[in-house]
């Protein structure tokens, strides 16, 4: 059994280069009776993600991209700021509406404006009769980019031929909500003064009065090669179809002038053809499949270095990828806040400590089953100060990442199983004692088997969890908790035409979000492509 049969790829090549939500609730009124097996159509894709909150102020909508993707030709256009509702804006919301019918793989896509990537997404796989879906994202943090005319580029790389017939038809709009004397809603992130895209190999020059600096990296392992399912690769010695010399441990790293500035655990995204079983994802995709959220690094300790007015190198890499092997995309934006009271903000990097990176994969051969145990981890602490117009500000960032996994498979890979946990813990201390602690946990527990009757079954559970606690001097502590879970079980007959697969499948996805101002708790259940439950608790 080859890897291309046991693990479906994202299709075609990786495209060049926050939070999205699919279409609104689709209630399963009356508890519909699902069919005995999948037919030629199913419920339109949707997610349990919370809707984008919108202010009630005056708004206007403009179209920034509208295209049919048949190949790898990007859509290019020109964005002009809306004359009917010039900024400042309380909020800017991006919406993508898509439709496709026939037969097609899942495809990865992006949208950039002025070189700033504002959307990265993937597509659902269509039914023969056709599907429609939508995703939304609060893109207010890119408001500085929207204030002036910009070139627009969008691409969802696709292949259309006699076999793969699905043309991906999309429209993307931006809706601008006027501020009208209002401040941003409570609990929202601040909007940076500048957003600077980072191009690999090109030095970056930032404003000399930068007092806060974040980097966001849309890191995705995909593109039709083994890095699409990097979490199942094995060392060269193990008899498995996808290999990486150092095993499955991956770590997204960012450097400033060659110095390690940030580390992060990549999210183990499962695209809508993943684990060889598209019947798991036809209606409810896995966490982040439509919501490719960036890894965010606080680089404020390095702001003083960048404030010298000279070009600097900002580079992103993925540790663990075999040398010379492609398969990862890491488009990067710098988000900068400037000190309105000073033209130049001096300071220094005062601390840089890291542990020795750990990465151990132990292969245990067996007559019936092979086993690979992997453990890896890394710690980094950096600190620096800035002499701002409102005094000296010290920022300390500590981050620790860890991976543990057990991969079991049989000869021929007719049984392939993985249980893995990734943790990414971060503490940022800034200003005069504000401390933000974030604990991120991602889990994957799945098994794919192919029986002697050629029936392929996949049972899979996924978790995407983040717990953030904030303490400020003189204020009560606050907490935000996000917990997104997915469970699926689907079976079909391999090696036969689509209409002879006799596929069955059930899925359950639940998204819980609790913040000081928000409560969201939604569960979706499906059977054979029919939405059987849509339960909103908050």
Image: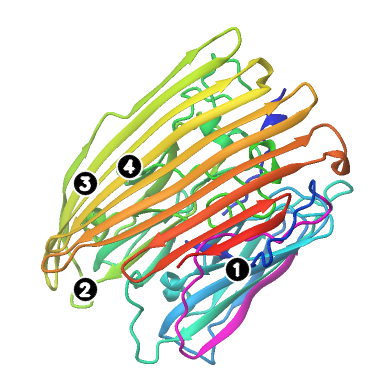
Real-space Cα separation, disc 4 to disc 2, in angstroms:
27 Å
Real-space Cα separation, disc 2 to disc 1, in angstroms:
49 Å
Asked which secondary structure carries label 4, the reply is: loop
Q: Sequence order check: which comes first, mark 2 or mark 3?
A: 2
Name the residue at the top extreme: 367
Give the residue number, with chain letter if any, for mark 2.
343
Q: Residue at x 66, y 46 (%)?
A: 506
Pointers 4 and 2 in contact (C-beta within 8 Å) = no
Vertically, is 373 above or below 250? above
Number of the label disc, if any, that sits on residue 25? 1
Q: Where is residue 403 in the image (x, y as percent from the top left)?
A: 39, 33
Give the residue number, with chain letter if any, for mark 3.
382
Residue 29 visible in the displayed image: yes
Residue 433 left/right relative to 315:
left
Q: Residue at x 21, y 58 (%)?
A: 304
Give the residue number, with chain letter if any, for mark 4.
258
Q: Residue at x 18, y 77 (%)?
A: 341
Vertically, is 511 above or below 455? below
Pointers 1 and 3 in contact (C-beta within 8 Å) = no
Q: Position of residue 290 (x, y in %)?
A: 58, 57
- Which contiguous range is marked in magenta? 39-68
């Amino acid at each position: 059994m080859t890897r291309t049969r046991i693990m479906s790829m994202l299709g075609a090549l990786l495209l060049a280069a926050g939070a999205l939500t699919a279409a609104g609730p689709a209630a399963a009124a009356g508890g519909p009776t699902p069919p005995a097996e999948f037919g030629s159509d199913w419920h339109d894709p949707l997610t349990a993600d919370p809707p984008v909150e919108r202010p009630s102020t005056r708004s206007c909508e403009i179209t920034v991209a509208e295209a049919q993707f048949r190949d790898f030709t990007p859509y290019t256009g020109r964005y002009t700021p809306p004359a009917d509702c010039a900024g400042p804006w309380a909020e800017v919301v991006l919406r993508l509406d898509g439709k496709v019918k026939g037969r097609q793989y899942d495809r990865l896509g992006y949208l950039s404006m002025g070189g700033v990537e504002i959307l990265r997404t993937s597509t659902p796989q269509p039914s023969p009769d056709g599907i429609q879906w939508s995703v939304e994202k609060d893109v207010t943090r890119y408001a500085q980019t929207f204030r002036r005319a910009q070139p627009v580029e969008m691409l969802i790389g696709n292949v259309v031929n006699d076999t793969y017939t699905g043309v991906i038809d999309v429209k993307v709009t931006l809706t601008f909500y006027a501020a009208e004397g209002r401040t941003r809603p409570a609990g929202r992130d601040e909007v940076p003064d500048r957003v600077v895209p980072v191009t690999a190999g090109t030095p970056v020059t930032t404003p000399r009065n930068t007092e806060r600096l974040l980097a966001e990296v849309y890191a995705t392992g995909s593109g039709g090669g083994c890095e699409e399912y990097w979490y199942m690769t094995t060392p060269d010695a193990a008899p498995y179809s996808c290999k990486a010399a150092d095993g499955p441990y991956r770590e997204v790293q960012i450097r400033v002038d060659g110095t390690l500035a940030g580390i992060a655990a990549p999210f183990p995204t499962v695209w809508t053809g993943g684990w060889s079983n598209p019947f798991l994802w036809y209606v409810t995709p896995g966490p982040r499949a439509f919501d490719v959220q960036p890894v965010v690094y606080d680089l404020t300790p390095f702001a003083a270095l960048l404030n010298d007015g000279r070009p600097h190198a900002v580079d992103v890499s993925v540790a663990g990828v075999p040398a010379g092997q492609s398969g990862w995309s890491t488009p990067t934006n710098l988000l900068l806040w400037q000190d309105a009271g000073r033209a130049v903000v001096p300071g220094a990097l005062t601390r840089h400590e890291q542990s020795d990176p750990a990465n151990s994969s132990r292969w245990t051969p067996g007559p019936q089953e092979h086993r690979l145990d992997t453990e890896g981890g890394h710690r980094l602490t950096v600190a620096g100060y800035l002499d701002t117009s409102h005094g000296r500000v010290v920022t300390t960032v500590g981050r620790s990442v860890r991976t543990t996994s057990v991969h079991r498979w049989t000869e021929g890979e007719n049984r392939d199983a993985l249980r893995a946990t990734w943790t990414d813990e971060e503490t940022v201390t800034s200003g005069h004692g504000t401390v933000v602690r974030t604990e991120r946990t991602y889990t994957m527990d799945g098994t794919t088997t192919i029986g002697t009757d050629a029936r392929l079954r996949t049972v899979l559970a996924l978790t995407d969890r983040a717990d953030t606690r904030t303490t400020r001097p003189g204020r009560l502590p606050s907490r935000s908790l996000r917990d997104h879970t997915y469970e699926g079980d689907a079976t079909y007959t391999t090696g036969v035409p689509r209409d002879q697969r006799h596929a069955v499948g059930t899925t359950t996805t639940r998204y819980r979000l609790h913040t000081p101002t928000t409560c969201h708790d939604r569960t979706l259940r499906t059977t054979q492509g029919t939405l059987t439950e849509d339960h909103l608790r908050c």
